[in-house]
Amino acid sequence: MKIIGFVGLPGSGKGEASKIARHHGLAVVVMGDIIREEAARQNLEPTDQNLGRIGNALREKDGPDAIARRTLDRVMATGKDVVVVDGLRSKAEADFFRAQAEEFHLVEVYAPAEARLKWLATRGRPDDPGSSTRSDSNTDIIRSPQDCRAAALKERESREMGWGMYEAIDAADMSLRNDRSLDDFRKNVEKVLGLLGTDAVSSDDPKT
């Protein structure tokens, strides 16, 4: 089995890269679905805070590769020879997949902070940084939606950095930049999938 893992900071475009891979017929397993389904089992709203607490709890209970081990079951269940795994958050997870797969490639998806904030504001997922204004708990200052989103993004990045996100990014085999147009990004994702030897994307594919 060949596993292609996408790693990147929140809002960098991992989901979009996975959507492109799926469009070309590749199986995609999203690691965050493990956390969201656990939140549903506990009757919790899938907010960033709740999902973060669940992610921490699972890793503390079952080790740093806890989510990766649960994800591997779903990877195997696809029955496919090539599977894309969206959302690695630590080198421990990358090491786990590398040990389990016959071939493993880790791809960083990179976008600057300003672009990530913009995309997160419009994505519409309940675990994205919110857009409503709120008062600071220690002052009477009303924080703007932009400030709220920036603070929430910083908090989320700090949590994921604690899981080992930056070490995973440093361990990536290649990097996909997502700082131009969506069409440019799509072509770059397709190019990387082709370089990694996926049959789904070839030079004569009319979609490339």
Image: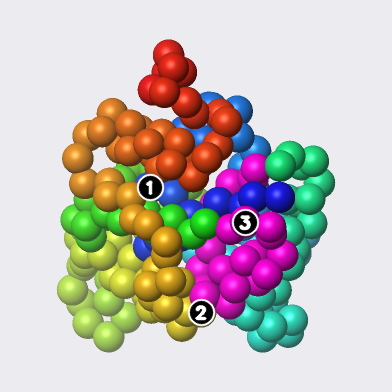
The residue identified by callout 3 is 103
Which kind of residue does numbered mark 1 sit on? Gly
Q: Is residue 159 visible?
A: no
Quarter of the image where one finds residue 114:
bottom left
Direction from residue 108 to residue 133 in the image, left or right: left
Magenta highlight on residue 91? yes
Q: Dot 1 corresponds to which residue? A: 13
Q: Are marks 3 and 2 in contact (CB under 8 Å)?
A: no
Which callout, 3 or 2, points at the residue further toward the start of the chain? Answer: 3
Q: Nearer the viewer, residue 10 or 150?
A: 10
Describe the element under mark 2 as helix, strand or loop.
helix
Name the quadrant containing residue 57.
bottom right
The label number, if any, that marks residue 156 in the structure image: none
- Which quadrant of the rendered structure holds the C terminus? top left
Tell me the amino acid under the disc marked 3.
Glu
Q: Secondary structure at mark 3?
A: strand
Q: Which residues are magenta?
A: 82-104
Q: Are marks 1 and 2 in contact (CB under 8 Å)?
A: no
Q: Residue 38 location in percent, x, y?
A: 72, 62
Q: Between label 3 and label 2, give the one nearer the viewer.
A: 3
Name the residue: 22% across, 82% down: 139
Disc 3 crowd, CA 10 A, few/some/many (<14, 14-19, 20+)? few
Look at 57% across and 31% down and name the residue there. 199
Where is residue 163 shown, x and y percent of the image? 51, 79
Q: Earlier in the sequence, mark 3 or mark 1?
A: 1
Q: Choose between 193 and 37: the one closer to the eye.
A: 193
Q: Amino acid at mark 2?
A: Trp
